[in-house]
């Protein structure tokens, strides 16, 4: 990615965001939360510090963005049946979450949140938020099935 001065073009913004999160993920996985360096993220992503800090004001905010991206990636919409069916939907959702949870990336992030959450409470908060969102998603699906079944 070429570093340029000034505001990025609209079509480049999504690519910049992806690159930042990708490089930040690699940094956190390799060095842990405490050892991660935003300077290394900037260098690896080929961006300026201004670009990074205009999006994420702290290491914690950047880590939370990674967790938010994982939440989005785990969205069950693609695996749930078009016509709500509780048993089929719950099985599909459980298998989907299990498969995603067993990826090396997800295991590393979970390990990181668990091992460093005592020193960095913001990691525990990110984990709690991720869990709450998952519960809300499945509760909404159960509610949809209940409404469909009357």
Image: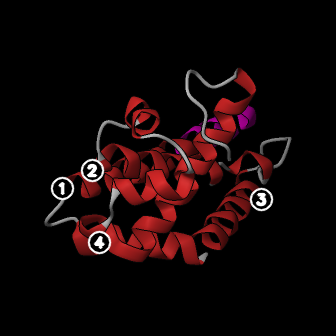
* Residue sticking out furthest to the right: 82
| Cα gap from disc 3 to disc 2, whole angstroms | 32 Å
Q: Read off the residue under disc 2.
A: 125
- Magenta stretch: give its range: 138-150
* Residue at 65% in and 48% down: 75
Q: Position of residue 23 (x, y in %)?
A: 53, 59
| Cα gap from disc 4 to disc 1, whole angstroms | 10 Å
Q: Read off the residue under disc 4.
A: 114
| Cα gap from disc 3 to disc 1, whole angstroms | 37 Å
| Cα gap from disc 4 to disc 2, whole angstroms | 11 Å
Q: Are marks 1 and 2 in contact (CB under 8 Å)?
A: yes
Q: Read off the residue under disc 3.
A: 88
* Residue at 63% in and 67% down: 100
Specify few, some or many for label 3: CA neighbours under 10 Å numbering under 14, 14-19, or 20 or more: few
Q: Position of residue 109 (x, y in %)?
A: 43, 68
* Of the image marks 3 and 1, the number of the one nearer the N terminus: 3
Q: Read off the residue under disc 1.
A: 121
Q: Position of residue 112 (x, y in %)?
A: 34, 71
């Amino acid at each position: 990615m070429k570093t340029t001065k000034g505001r990025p073009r609209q079509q480049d913004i999504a690519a910049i965001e992806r690159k930042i999160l990708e490089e930040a993920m690699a940094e956190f996985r390799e060095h842990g939360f405490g050892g991660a360096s935003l300077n290394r993220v900037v260098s690896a992503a080929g961006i300026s510090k201004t670009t990074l800090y205009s999006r994420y004001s702290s290491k914690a905010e950047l880590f939370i963005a990674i967790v938010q991206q994982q939440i989005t990636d785990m969205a069950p919409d693609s695996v749930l049946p078009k016509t709500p069916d509780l048993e089929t939907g719950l099985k599909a959702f459980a298998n989907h979450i299990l498969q995603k949870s067993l990826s090396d990336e997800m295991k590393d992030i979970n390990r990181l949140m668990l091992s460093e959450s005592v020193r960095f409470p913001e990691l525990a908060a990110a984990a709690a938020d991720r869990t709450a969102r998952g519960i809300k998603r499945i509760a909404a699906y159960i509610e949809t099935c209940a409404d469909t079944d009357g």
